Amino acid sequence: MLSLHPLPALGDNYIWMLADADAGTALVVDPGDAAPVLAALAADGLGLAAILLTHHHPDHVGGVPALVERFPAVEIWAPRDDRIPVASRRVGEGDTVVIASPSSSFEVLEVHGHTRSHVAYHGEGLLFCGDTLFSLGCGRLFEGTPAEMLASLDRLAALPGNTRVCCAHEYTLSNAAFALAVEPDNAALHARIETIRDLRARNLPSLPAVLADELATNPFLRIDAIAGERIPWPDRTQPSPRRVDRFAALRSAKDRFRA
Ligand code: ZN
Ligand code: FE
């Protein structure tokens, strides 16, 4: 049976580990640092069979060389991007990642916006979405346009509601402040924040999130639901009918937001 473990790393990253204790194998997603992975594998007597990478940023790939050194046969799945130099399999839209052990398979979605080659992996009821979708937030637009990011988020939002969303950072509480400013009357959001505060007070991860909960509370998935006057329009006298303009305004408001 598969078990899912968020391994805290580098301050506010999570390296997601999916393990099969009976088989003695594990895979990890976005190992920005090798040390927490090696410690978790050693603690459970597991070998590392596969690494899934979502994008090239150092906090997602930095641990790969040390993991390859310790597990030379590890298979590395990565998007087509020269900035990720080491990979055994390159993946793109519509590909299926099949891993023999821990027995699992994932569909690849290209979700550009944070970077120009970012991918997400969906399978086993899980979504590994890197820095594209965060709980109560979304990634910054470093290399993509608002339209690209919105299209990526729309695709993730269309996955089954019971999907467990495995984001790569513990940003949930800081995202909550902005979400509340946008939707102060969202009862589901208030209830979620209580739960998240309680988890964080006990130093537990706020993740994985359930996609249906994100749809009810994450402003970046609620472009069509948020009351117009709550969106900080660039020009408040010019209500825009375009979703992408609403999204762009929301994203840039978040960039400027200080709780
Ligand atoms: Zn990133
Ligand atoms: Fe990151």
Image (tube, rainbow, N blue to C red):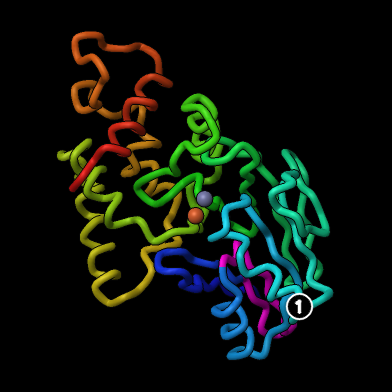
Q: Is residue 10 visible?
A: yes
User: Above or below — where is 73 with respect to 54?
Assistant: below
Whether residue 34 sits left or right of residue 234 in the image: it is: right
Residue 137 x, y percent position in the rendering: 37, 45
Residue 165 seen = no
- Give the tally of numbered discs: 1
In the rendered image of this protein, does residue 185 appear above or below residue 98?
Answer: above
* The residue stretch that appears in magenta: 18-32
In this view, 209 is above or below 38:
above
Out of 168 and 11, give the one closest to the viewer.
Answer: 11
Which image quadrant: the N terminus? bottom right
In the picture as drawn, the residue positioned furthest to the top comes out as 238
| Kind of residue at disc 1 | Glu
Q: Residue at x 25, y 48 (%)?
A: 189
Locate residue 211 relative to residue 34 in the image: left or right: left
Rendered residue at 57%/58% (across/down): 58
Write the residue at 81% across / 68% down: 100
Q: Secondary structure at mark 1?
A: helix
**Could you tell me residue 228's position as x and y percent?**
24, 21
Residue 68 lies left or right of residue 53; in this view the side is right
Question: Looking at the picture, how far across and down is residue 47, in whole percent?
Answer: 73, 82
Residue farthest toward the left in the current orientation of the protein? 185
Asked if residue 27 is among those painted magenta in the image, a careful observer would answer yes
- Disc 1 crowd rating (10 Å Cα; few below 14, some 14-19, many 20+) is few
Q: For residue 196, which quarter of the picture?
A: bottom left
Image quadrant in which you'd find residue 185: top left
> Image quadrant of residue 118?
top right
* Residue matched to label 1: 69
**Label 1 CB less than 8 angstroms from ligand 2:** no
- Identity of the residue drawn at 54% across and 79% down: 36
